[in-house]
Amino acid sequence: MVLDAFDRYLTLRRHASVHTREGYLRDLSQWFAFLNEEGKQWHEATPAEVEAYINFLMEYGLGHRSIRRRLAAMRTFYRFQLRAGAIDASPVPPRIGPKASRKLPTVLTVEEVESMMKVWDLSTPLGERNRTILEVLYSCGLRVSELCQLQRTHLFFKEGLMRITGKGRKERIIPLGTVVKRRLIDYWKHIRPRFPERPHSAPYVFVNRRGSPLSRVAVFHIVKEAAERAQVRKNVSPHTLRHTFATHLLEGGADLRAIQALLGHASLTTTEIYAHVSRQMLKETLETYHPFGRYAQSRK
């Protein structure tokens, strides 16, 4: 087994401790499981899969230190395979990974989101599907895994609601805005039937061109392509649209606890860190609610 050979390398050549070896093997097993869900083996991975994996880990709340540790295990493993001649190049770039100093994720402007939605050719089923995916991510704040698992029985068009099962199998209800509700109804009635029908994927809202359920990496590519076509000069992923959803709600005056419920955060502290507050909003809050701020306003 490939991990057995790597474990022997860590023991005999790297003189790694039992703790280090167990940690590396555990991290690699989880990486292999992620790839398996995408229909790939370890030697077929590309930098795109690695980047999607990083975003997947960030989505599920892993800290920068934990993610960088996993990347260290992956780098060591692929260097070992490279020296052994099993692969031609490592899929793990030397400098990829979250920066420990980076406190706030990327946020898009409304104009950037709209420009990304407009890049698709709506005369094709794939263009309609991709546009709908972007609208759902931005309008509902879903995690990419939640989007991929979305089924028709989770949508209640009459009531204007969506039922989501998130982390820890916790359910939450998300209201559907008028725009995204209309698009989802039109997509399900007129676009989804144009994709190949497969028994195992019939209930799923989003499928690929072969009719199989859409993977996380596929959604990652769709969002990346939209940003590139729209010439958005930011590092954009599906998680960026979730964060932008929360940010725009907060800047629009939404209550932090309401945003917590919509995102499915167990702790309000997570939401406070996650939801980026613009400097202008902080300035206005200070001037409105702090005694000296109110005094300054009254003196104008």
Image: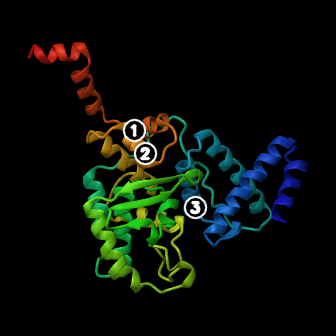
- Give how far apart the Cα atoms at labels 2 and 1 are: 6 Å
- Give how far apart the Cα atoms at labels 3 and 2 are: 34 Å
**Could you tell whether 127 is left or right of 6 in the image?**
left
| Residue 225 image point, x, y percent | 40, 66
Label 2: which residue?
261
Image quarter of the N terminus:
bottom right
Label 1: which residue?
257
Q: Which numbered disc flags the more N-terminal residue, 1 or 3? A: 3
Q: Is residue 295 above or below residue 207?
A: above
> Among all residues in the image, which is located at the extreme right?
12
Label 3: which residue?
47
The residue under label 1 is which amino acid type?
Arg
For mark 2, give the secondary structure: helix
Q: Residue at x 44, y 40 (%)?
A: 274
Q: Nearer the viewer, residue 10 or 63?
A: 63
Q: Nearer the viewer, mark 1 or mark 3?
A: 1
Dot 1 alpha-carbon crowd within 10 angstroms: few under 14, some 14 to 19, many 20 or more = some
- Do the CB atoms of the residues marked 2 and 1 lie less than 8 Å apart? yes
**Could you tell whether 280 is left or right of 63 in the image?**
left
The residue under label 2 is which amino acid type?
Ala
**Could you tell whether 121 is left or right of 87 in the image?**
left
The quarter of the picture where residue 163 lies is: bottom left
